[in-house]
Amino acid sequence: MTGPNDIDAIRAAFQTDLAAVANEQDLQTVRDRYLGRKQGAVAALMKSMADAPPADRPAIGKSANLLKREIDLALATRKETLEASTRPAGSVDVTLPGREMPFGRRHPLTLIREQVESIFGTMGFEILQGPQVEDDYHNFEALNMPPDHPARDMQDTFYLDRPMPGVDRTASTQPATLLRTHTSGMQIRYMENHQPPVRIIAPGLVYRRDTPDLTHSPMFLQVEGLLVDDGITMADLKGTLVSFLQAFFDTDIRVMFRPSFFPYTEPSAEVFISCVFCGGDGCPVCKKTGWLEILGCGMVHPAVFEAVGYDPERYTGWAFGLGIDRVALLKHRVEDIRLFYDNDLRLLEQFPH
Ligand SMILES: [Zn+2]
């Protein structure tokens, strides 16, 4: 006679056996004992249904099937826990949820540099990279700054193979090696090897012996621009820079050129834009002038052309130097240039990828 009592007895016996399982082999033994096709307890239960009264058979069949599923599930669960406990430490559990990897992103100064390159690229400028360790000739002398020129103030330059300040540099006969103080050396390097027309920009890191503060960093990013051809005038310079600045700041900013002095350009100018913070009304950032200085530029000095073997009677050209950090500060309204070099993720994560 088969009844609910038999089913309960099998279930209880199975629970006891399952609790005693210690390894895969035990598990297989228990599986055979209860779910084996010929000798298994559930199979025996099914067979015994034949002796039961016909009216009881459907109920017994249903219960037997439920028990079979229950045992199946319990065995599968025990199998998983057995596998987890026997897995060697350090192995991969593919069932664990994935670990999220933080995405890297480009540095805000890289994004600004790429934007500058893109705007000048569409205007047909070639983009060059140059050495950060430069020699005296390319950094100073060929740019119309002979050894006694006041513009090459030793305080500003990191010399790599020269005595420190206070020692007479001119006494040495070896040419000095230094960390470039501007990207202008790339003008010389390019013109030495190419004939006009010239249309280049050269972005890169430059170095000065400045004490870090809100607006100064001993290492910063500059981009040099140079255009040389027949009949180039200051109007070309102005048109190009105004187009660039309006594209870069993406607003109708006003641009002002003010006479200035650089040894390697004549005439020279400082370029100001209407203050991006106050729109020109005057605020603390623009010191109430309504204008922000943004770059230096001018017509290439004839002495520079002579240094590279260009005929200054035939060719004219212009050059500019723009601080990428400077425009990044203005564009993103960051107040301290040092933040760009601290690499604090709290700042960097605020910029788009
Ligand atoms: Zn302002």
Image (cartoon, helix red, strand yellow):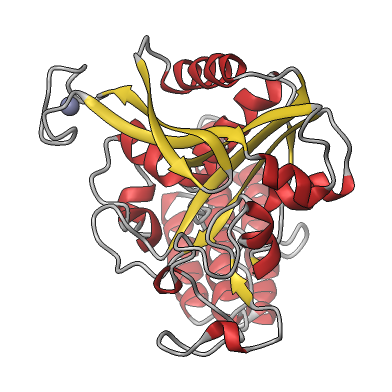
Residue 8 occupies which quadrant of the picture? bottom left
Q: Position of residue 330 (x, y in %)?
A: 32, 34
Residue 76 occupies which quadrant of the picture? bottom right
User: Going 69% across and 26% down the picture, which residue do you hit?
Assistant: 121
Q: Is residue 303 above or below residue 254?
A: below
User: Going 32% across and 49% down the picture, which residue do you hit?
Assistant: 347
Q: Position of residue 10 (x, y in %)?
A: 50, 63
The extreme front residue here reads: 313
State left or right for residue 195 relative to residue 86.
Answer: right
Give the camera-side residue of 305 and 63.
305
Q: Is residue 168 visible?
A: yes
Q: Is residue 107 above or below residue 352?
A: below
Locate ligand 1 by image quadrant.
top left
Q: Is residue 241 above or below residue 17?
A: above
Give the camera-side residue of 180 and 171.
171
Q: Where is residue 346 in the image (x, y as percent from the top left)?
A: 30, 52
State left or right for residue 18 relative to residue 319.
Answer: left
Residue 197 occupies which quadrant of the picture? top right
